[in-house]
Amino acid sequence: MIGGAAALLVNVSTQPVEAAEVIVYKSPTCGCCNEWVDHLRSNGFTVSTRDRSNMQPIKQEFGVQAGLQSCHTATVDGYFIEGHVPAKDIKRLLSEKPEISGLTVPGMPMGSPGMEGHRKDSYAVLEVDPDNNTSVYAQY
């Protein structure tokens, strides 16, 4: 019976996080934004995109500060997701539901989801609290 309970725990922990739709605001001509959207979809997220020629009003609306910005901004369940944040970190966010404003990967680091290529740079996913303080959420 213990083995069955352990198997049940494993099955529950690997289930996808149920979440509201991810809305991605992006430039209509940005290829890496499309690649990141594909990354989310391949990891079980439902995603809709909203093309914008000027991203600054969106970033201001969601409170994404200049030094934390990237090429696209998304929202999910009341959080902002800025840049090339891995899907597993978004799933963790939605599972844990911390009292933060969102997650960001500033810039466009090579090797992050949507920025795969000939090299892989180290980068951090930062959490942003309501006072715009940041701390490392995940390191790659």
Image (spheres, rainbow, N blue to C red):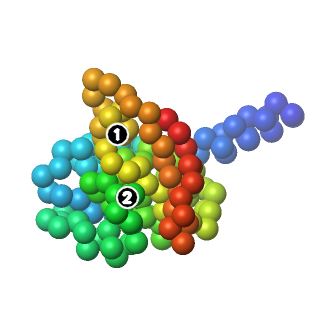
Q: Visible in this render: residue 77?
A: no
Q: Nearer the viewer, residue 90 or 125?
A: 125
Query: Residue 9 appears at what percent x and percent y?
Result: 73, 41
Q: Residue at x 29, y 57 (%)?
A: 72
Q: Quick check: 66 above or below 70?
A: below
Q: Which residue appears farthest toward the front when viewing the image?
A: 67
Classify mark 1: helix, strand or loop: loop
Q: For the point 14% across and 65% down, which residue is it?
A: 53
From mark 2 to mark 1, how far is it between C-alphas? 14 Å
Under mark 2, the amino acid is: Gly
Residue 121 occupies quadrant: top left
The residue identified by callout 2 is 67
Position of residue 47 relative to residue 113, above or below, is below
Locate residue 18, reporting x and y percent.
53, 57
Tag 2: Cα neighbours inside 10 Å, few (<14), some, or many (≥20)? Answer: few
Q: Are marks 2 and 1 in contact (CB under 8 Å)?
A: no
Residue 73 seen: yes
Up/down of 29 relative to 21, above or below = above
Residue 67 point in image, percent of width and height: 37, 58
The local crowd at label 1, few if under 14, some if 14 to 19, many if 20 or more residues have their Cα within 10 Å, is: many
Task: Check disc 1 and give the amino acid type.
Answer: Pro
Asked whether 77 or 119 is in front, the reply is 119
Residue wearing tag 1: 109
Secondary element under disc 2, as helix, strand or loop, is: helix
Looking at the image, which residue is at 25% across and 69% down? 56
Pointer 2 or 1: first along the chain: 2
Q: Which mark is residue 70?
A: none
Please name the residue shown 50% across and 67% down the image. 132
Image side of residue 37 versus residue 11, left or right: left
In this view, the residue in front, 12 or 88, is 88
